[in-house]
Image (spheres, rainbow, N blue to C red):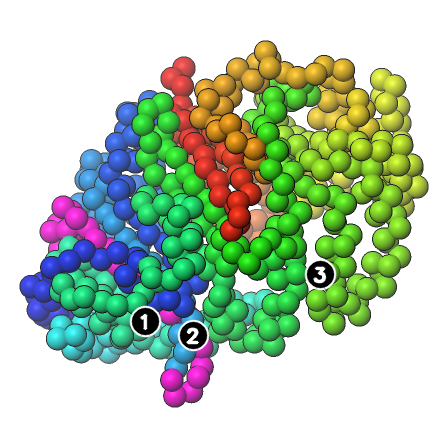
Amino acid sequence: MLLATAFIAASSVVASELSIEQVAPEHSVLVMSLDEVGGMMDRIMETPAGQNMKPIEDVRDRFMDGLPESMSDAFGESMESTEDFIKMMSDMKMGLAIYPEVDPETTAVTIGFTMFMDLGEAGKPMGKLWDEAMEQAEEEDSERFEIIEVAETDVIRIDMQDEEMEEEDDPFGGGMGRGGMGMGMDIENAMPDRSYMVRVEDNIMISTSRSQMARMLDIVAGQEIEGGLGESTIWKGMTGYIGERGLRMILLTDHLGELMGAFGQPFIVNMMRPTVAAMFGKIEALGFAVESAESPALATFRMGAWIPEGKTGLMKLMSKNTPREPIPAWVTAETVDYGRLNFDFEGVISWLNDVIDSNPMLAMQAGQMMEQMEPMMDKVLSGIGNRIQMSSSISYPLTAESINSLWNMPAKDGKAFTDAMAEMAPQMGFEPRDFQGHQIYSMDMGGMMGAMGGGSMEMAVAVGGGDIFMGSLPAVEQSLRSVGKRSSEDSEISKKFASVEQYFSSEPVVYWQVGDLGTKMAAEAEVNSMMWSSELDELQAEDPELAAELAEMMGEDDDASFIESVTKWFGVTGLEIMSVEDGFKGQGWVLSPVEE
């Protein structure tokens, strides 16, 4: 068959390994790479959850369900064994780059992508399965497949789905086809007309660009290649923050506007560029990386924002480093995450004015409103200090109101803040009442939260003990009960997170956080599932036909059960972010779960 011929012809040229630094073009916008998965899988298998195999089996099942039918049929028999799935995942390396692609004749911009998968020791069995899947796809739609020569290698060229092709006829699962996205997004013209694909021994390579495919083939053939994203200053700066291993995801902003313009709204994109710059500053890249770690840590992660021209906008408001402090006393034993962020409230009004002035249309619509609101905003903001503390707590048994959140800010001028609240509260729907000598302003959000799927909820604002508390009413009331206590260094919550706090540096930071990620994710998933079931039952009574359609559309998957299974891999987590000369850098840790 055509595809088998291409695979055989390509199988003799491999000489060098592919890397995303060499493969990704300099105008890339989103870049992902994955290597050294084996170490992460080994660490997972050492945990209690990994040893009982259930979470990995759940991941395998989700992986298989997400494959197009032509691939899942070919992979099915090989993936019946959990050990085979672990082997495949452990050996795999991959890279993906997404970028704007400009037609030299028409100057039309489309979404371009280039990706590769190095199957490692799993290359022979998995390569054979890939060949079978592609041959099945060719049989189902042979008119779209053609063999062409690229870099002296036979490569498959696939014409992308045309307007007349139904999504279910797409052999690649509909993900690469044409169609509308809604919201004014023109995905039809954004998608490329064709893609190129080839397997060279253990490497599977796919690209929408013939020149990019030729570049990858030259690399695996051992030729010296110049250029590529790895030689750019931005890439070097970002990898200096997040490293060069593990799972990496990097967003580069220089060509982001061009990529968004591919969706058919270049006027809106160009108009919003100055506003985005005023809002966030000139961030040239954002990056995140995670890799395996030595016990008791399961994984370490790093992140960074590359801002070499200096911090402006929102980034400037969050750029002050201060020493870490003990967890405060108002953080209860039910808390599942706590974080502290430095934030310059005094600069908020100036920042908002800069954002509004950056866009003539926005200035026309919001300028006058801002002038009217500014005196009141100044009263509120002048009473707040330059720090935000955030926490979430969970109460059991789980109900729609089990998850509570709280924000805390120092009251730089408590009287100015309470005076402003007394003036604004009636207009905003807040009602004042006394609570243990403190005045609480609360508002029932039941109708609003119910419409959003969040159940009934009462929000509150109060000042006590030199702090401003905002959030769920139960959390605010509990915090006011703790007024007068200096810290919770010997509390249950401090003991809970002591194991991860030992990893923190002694350096001043902009932001730091500790949390019980697995517990929070599992609880949120269960609450959402409970609420969805309740809403479906109510709809069943009103419109049985619509309820049946929605139930079928959502499928039979038990997301709460799946998330609970997977989150058993995770213990407590910690994160710290520092402001540095060229932006921000951060590091964090995920600890192995403690066996109960």
Image x and y of residue 414, in percent: 85, 31
Q: In the depicted view, which residue is nearer to us: 81 or 382?
A: 382
Residue drawn at 61 percent across, 44 percent down: 319
Q: Which residues are magenta?
A: 104-130
Kindly report which numbered mark, 3 or 2, lies closer to the viewer in this rendering. 3
Residue drawn at 14 percent across, 46 percent down: 121
- How far apart marks 1 and 2 lie (CA) works out to 10 Å
Among all residues in the image, which is located at the extreme bottom?
Answer: 105
Q: Which residue is mark 2?
A: 110
Image x and y of residue 542, in percent: 66, 47
Quarter of the picture containing the C terminus is top left
Q: Is residue 126 magenta?
A: yes
Q: Residues within 10 Å of mark 3 (few under 14, many from 20)?
A: many
Left-right relation of 146 to 470: left
Among all residues in the image, which is located at the extreme front?
Answer: 581
Q: In the picture, residue 127 is in which quadrant?
A: bottom left
Left-right relation of 358 to 125: right
Q: Which residue is mark 1?
A: 208
Residue drawn at 88 percent across, 36 percent down: 416
Q: Residues within 10 Å of mark 2 (few under 14, many from 20)?
A: many
Q: Which residue is mark 3?
A: 355
Disc 1 marks which amino acid?
Thr
Label 3 vs 2, first from the N-terminus = 2
Disc 2 marks which amino acid?
Thr
